[in-house]
């Protein structure tokens, strides 16, 4: 039995000891665990490593129908993220291949990042830091003043586990919290002191907007030129969901034309972006982090352990125990 651990070099775990230990404890010492660093320009080489694999552990490799055609032995794809938009689910289902994202490992970490972004952008900390470090300018009025967070309305798009956690952390910080999610009952939101509303109402009323949605075909470019034009309060916009939820050209236009006052992005279109030439890089009112909102010692260990256990459970017929 062969387990293949593979991803882009920047997306690989810093070490693989815990993954290998978990897999061998669950499946036996005689299994083969191969670690392969993936790149798009070596797709055919990846197929050679994939062809005899019983399980694949990855996050961002595109597993489309062509890739699955090169994996006749594959029984399960374990995704070491909460999203699974990189896998063609119909093609996997047709071949009887299980797909197991990790349902819970970084809720607290991502919601902490949401609050950190909200505070840093409202206080223009990046711009002030540049004034100090680069311009050597000591001037509190060198950047615009914003209202206190306690006087602002927070709008959360996507009110799943992470959205709810962010709301709990923001309770008492913001004047009010509103949310959009067609899959959440009003009673659930009410119990957290959050008002469920429509997309249009949230865009109109929010001083701060945080995206916590998973990516689906329905919310691809959910935030587009029309959406940004509806943001009457020129809010802070923070994307902690998926890069493709946001039309980056429309976001650039919104920043250039004052439709929003600042932006925070933990994700971009590409997991290997050309940062030297990216139009959102280098702006005083834009914070970008390298998909690191999840990152802590606790979450990293949980992610490696749980994604490996999902393979063990699937291959040993204990699918009901999988952490999805």
Image (tube, rainbow, N blue to C red):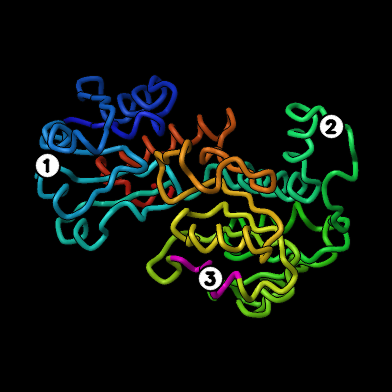
Give the extent of the magenta segment: 221-228
Residue 313 sits in quarter: top left
Q: CA distance from mark 2 to mark 3?
A: 35 Å
Instruction: Give the residue at x 45% y 68%.
Output: 219
| In the foreground, 169 or 270 | 270
Q: Would residue 191 be visible to someone looking at this image?
A: no
Q: Position of residue 52 (x, y in %)?
A: 11, 34
Task: Return the residue at label 3.
Answer: 225
Q: Would residue 147 be visible to someone looking at this image?
A: yes
Residue 76 sits in quarter: top left
Element type at mark 1: loop
Q: Position of residue 276 (x, y in %)?
A: 47, 36
Q: Position of residue 262 (x, y in %)?
A: 69, 54
For the residues bearing labels 2 and 1, Cβ distance under 8 angstroms: no
Q: Is residue 62 left or right of residue 66?
A: right
Q: Quadrant of the N terminus?
A: top left
Question: Vertically, is 202 above or below 312?
Answer: below
Which numbered marker is on residue 137?
2
Q: Earlier in the sequence, mark 2 or mark 3?
A: 2
In the rendered image, residue 76 lying in the magenta stretch gets the answer no
In the rendered image, residue 227 lying in the magenta stretch gets the answer yes
Q: Is residue 58 left or right of residue 279?
A: left
Q: Position of residue 237 (x, y in %)?
A: 65, 58
Task: Return the residue at label 1.
Answer: 73
């Amino acid at each position: 039995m062969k387990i293949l651990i593979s991803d882009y070099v920047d997306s690989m775990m810093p070490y693989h000891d815990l993954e290998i230990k978990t897999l061998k404890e669950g499946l036996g010492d005689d299994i083969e665990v191969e670690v392969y660093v993936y790149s798009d320009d070596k797709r055919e080489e990846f197929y050679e490593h994939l062809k005899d694999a019983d399980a694949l552990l990855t996050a961002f490799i595109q597993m489309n129908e062509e890739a699955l055609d090169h994996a006749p032995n594959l029984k399960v794809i374990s995704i070491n993220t909460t999203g699974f938009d990189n896998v063609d689910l119909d093609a996997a289902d047709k071949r009887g291949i299980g797909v197991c994202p990790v349902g819970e490992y970084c809720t607290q970490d991502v919601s902490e990042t949401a609050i950190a972004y909200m505070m840093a952008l409202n206080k223009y900390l990046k711009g002030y830091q540049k004034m100090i470090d680069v311009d050597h300018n000591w001037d509190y009025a060198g950047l615009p003043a914003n209202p206190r967070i306690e006087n602002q309305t927070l709008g959360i798009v996507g009110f799943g586990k992470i959205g709810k956690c962010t709301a709990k952390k923001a309770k008492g910080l913001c004047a009010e919290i509103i949310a959009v999610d067609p899959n959440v009952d009003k009673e659930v939101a009410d119990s957290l002191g959050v008002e469920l509303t429509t997309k249009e109402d949230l865009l109109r009323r929010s001083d701060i907007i945080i995206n916590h949605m998973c990516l689906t075909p329905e919310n691809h470019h959910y935030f587009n030129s029309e959406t940004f034009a509806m943001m009457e309060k020129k809010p802070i916009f923070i994307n902690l969901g998926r890069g493709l939820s946001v039309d980056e050209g429309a976001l650039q236009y919104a920043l250039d034309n004052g439709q929003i006052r600042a932006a925070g992005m933990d994700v971009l279109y590409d997991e290997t972006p050309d940062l030297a030439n990216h139009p959102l890089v280098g702006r005083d009112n834009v914070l970008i982090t390298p998909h690191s909102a999840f990152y802590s010692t606790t979450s990293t260990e949980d992610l490696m352990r749980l994604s490996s256990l999902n393979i063990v459970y699937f291959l040993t017929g204990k699918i009901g125990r999988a952490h999805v």
